[in-house]
Image (cartoon, rainbow, N blue to C red):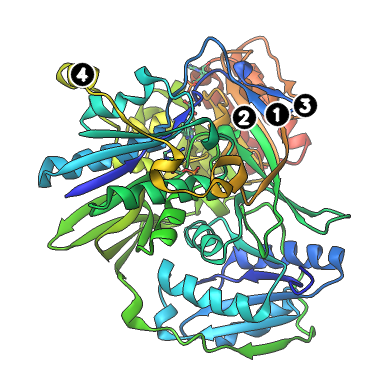
Amino acid sequence: MAEYKGIMVLAETAEGGLANIARELLGCGRKLASDLGEELSAVILGDNVAGLAQGVIAYGADKVYIADNPLFKDYRAESYTDAMEVIIKQVMPRILLLGQTSTGRDLAPRLAFRLGTSATTDCIELAIDADSKQLLQTKPVYGGNAIATFTSDCYPQIATVRPKVYSPLEPDNSRQGEITAIDTKPESTAIRTKVIEKVSRIKEGVRLEDAAVVVAGGRGISSAEGFKQLEELACLLRGAIGATRPPCDNGWVQNSAQIGLTGKIIAPEFYMAIALSGSSQHISGCSGARNIIAINKDAEANIFNIARFGIVGDWKKVLPAFTEKARELLAE
Amino acid sequence: MNIIVCIKQVIDPEAPPTSFKIDAATNRVVLPADIPPVIDPYSEYALEAALKLKDTHGGKITAISLGNNLLREVIKKPLSMGADELILLEDEAFTDGDSWSTAYALALAIKKIDEYDMILCGRQSADRDAGQVGPGIAEILGLPGITLAHKIDISGDKALVERVSDDGYEIIETTLPAMITISNEIGEPRYPTIRGIMAAKKKEPTVWKPADIGIEPSRVGDAGRRSRLVKLLKPVYEGKCEIIDGETPEEAAVNLAERLRQEKLL
Ligand SMILES: Cc1cc2nc3c(=O)[nH]c(=O)nc-3n(C[C@H](O)[C@H](O)[C@H](O)COP(=O)(O)OP(=O)(O)OC[C@H]3O[C@@H](n4cnc5c(N)ncnc54)[C@H](O)[C@@H]3O)c2cc1C
Ligand SMILES: Nc1ncnc2c1ncn2[C@@H]1O[C@H](COP(=O)(O)O)[C@@H](O)[C@H]1O
């Protein structure tokens, strides 16, 4: 398969700029490209996106392919798959990386099936096999109870990468790169889906995915009032509120606070895990946290296996005293 | 409204993590002997979405499952929840497949069923956590596909689908037939009714072998894989937890705050 060469990333946009995940993928792709001694390219699909190319180069790309068309304003599986198919057949990258985002998780499998190759979704580690030069794609399976590494003999090798796993490079605005506009000749008539409306549920305050501090509660919090106490601490630490699934199902906290396999995937500096047991499905969403601090009345709770600091005790007694002391220390 | 729902049998994702074992020599999960498999919870959400549509629009629900040694008392659950028909792609040859071979066989079976307005799958499966079979089926059959739906409405010959996005949701209109994957926000799957359980007892699933769906042997199960499993491990968390004590819980809390300050975490 000598004709497939180089790494390509899909650089998603957000609010007219580059999305965080795009910078992370460029950071990850740059490393793989050096390991292989090959080039890193990036694709930008969108409407009015030509201005983003230079930024993509600053974050590590050698080449940028831009498909600028009003039809790419909204993500739609059909139009994006068609466009990526054209670009991939032209560039023939060895490896294609996308983000594990609402776009990437939809597009990657669709594209893999279109091209007759395989994809691995939600990767938390990517490496190049020294002998075969194939991409080793590592991801959680069985709800986080196991970690699997896949590879494939088909090209391009496609993987989606979990947000927050890789860090962006320091942008270098003096970096030079090649920018190519590609007309993928999209046909609006061939597209059978239409985006009617986009509804954002992001409230004021810190976005859970971006928060450096997250205060999370589990079933043991047992009420909406309980979560108010967590909110007090979150507010003090300028952090966001998180939860396991039961509090969301019970309506003690909004659904968007759920962390885990089927909720948000986060990697804060500081994760306070209160009255939650640490199920594999939950840990799947927060194992990237730098410092996990657990409060649980059960010394055997699994959360203590991944926490750095912990208190075995009743949160109702521990939390108020902790919040008070933290307030005092922070005021100093 | 004719709906096809893809349902998978999986090892119980809520079994205690300690019961979860991997045989390093074969890179396989050792099935816990005392914990029976279940219907993939995500597939169950897909079935719930189908039942909701049937509640308002009527029609027929066909559940379809691919695997080997599918336990009848487990795999017939869709019938007891309200599905009308159950088709099993059941054969030794279907084992050890990946997203490719699974989606390919399911797509051929769906082609054989022929009459459908919608194909529903789970957003991912509780064992593979891939989220590929649904989009794969859509691509093979050349259908529009929408993933991560938490609500579906029908208006005329189109469907209005609310899709969970990174910061909220989006409303997407699609022509039918379409493939849609369902997210857990659709709502808790209903319990089987007594009547449903009785009906399911009497109903036998239709079993199709590879030859029945005209699949080439090179594309079935293990032979049809396009990805290769290199290794399978249990995650290790090397973190050593420092337990902070105190005479009282309140004192422990104060000690914790001070310890975190020391570490510059507060
Ligand atoms: C397919 C699938 C997907 C899932 N996805 C997710 C997901 O994305 N996110 C998620 O979180 N879950 C998810 N789950 C659910 C998951 O399996 C667990 O059921 C859930 O995480 C348990 O939440 P918990 O830890 O809050 O509750 P429990 O496991 O019930 O733990 C409660 C803990 O609180 C402690 N406690 C109780 N009272 C007190 C007190 N007064 N003081 C101190 N400690 C106390 C107890 O000791 C216990 O450890 C999923 C499940 C499945 C099957
Ligand atoms: N063997 C199978 N039989 C029936 N449906 C399946 C099978 N494997 C996957 N699916 C469907 O595809 C969804 C996503 O699976 P996956 O792509 O494996 O994560 C599941 O929730 C099911 O709806």
**Amino acid type at mark 4:** Lys
Q: Is residue A128 left or right of residue A12?
A: right
Name the residue tied to disc 3. Answer: B25
Q: Estimate the spatial distance between the alpha carbons at disc 4 and disc 1, rounded to whole Å.
A: 41 Å
A141 left or right of B237 in image:
left
Q: Mark 4 or mark 3: which comes first in sequence?
A: 3
Cα separation between marks 3 and 2: 18 Å
Q: Assess whether mark 3 and mark 4 are in contact (beta carbons under 8 angstroms).
A: no
Disc 3 element: loop
Q: Are marks 3 and 2 in contact (CB under 8 Å)?
A: no
Please report, as a chain letter, where disc 3 is located: B
Q: Is mark 3 within 8 Å of ligand 2?
A: no
Which residue is identified by label 2? A145
Residue A203 in view (yes/no): no
Q: Which residue is mark 4?
A: B202
Mark number, residue B234: 1
Residue A163 is marked as none
- State the SS at label 1: loop
Q: In front: B64, or A96? A: B64
Q: Residue at x 72, y 64 (%)?
A: A168
C-alpha span from label 2 to label 4: 37 Å
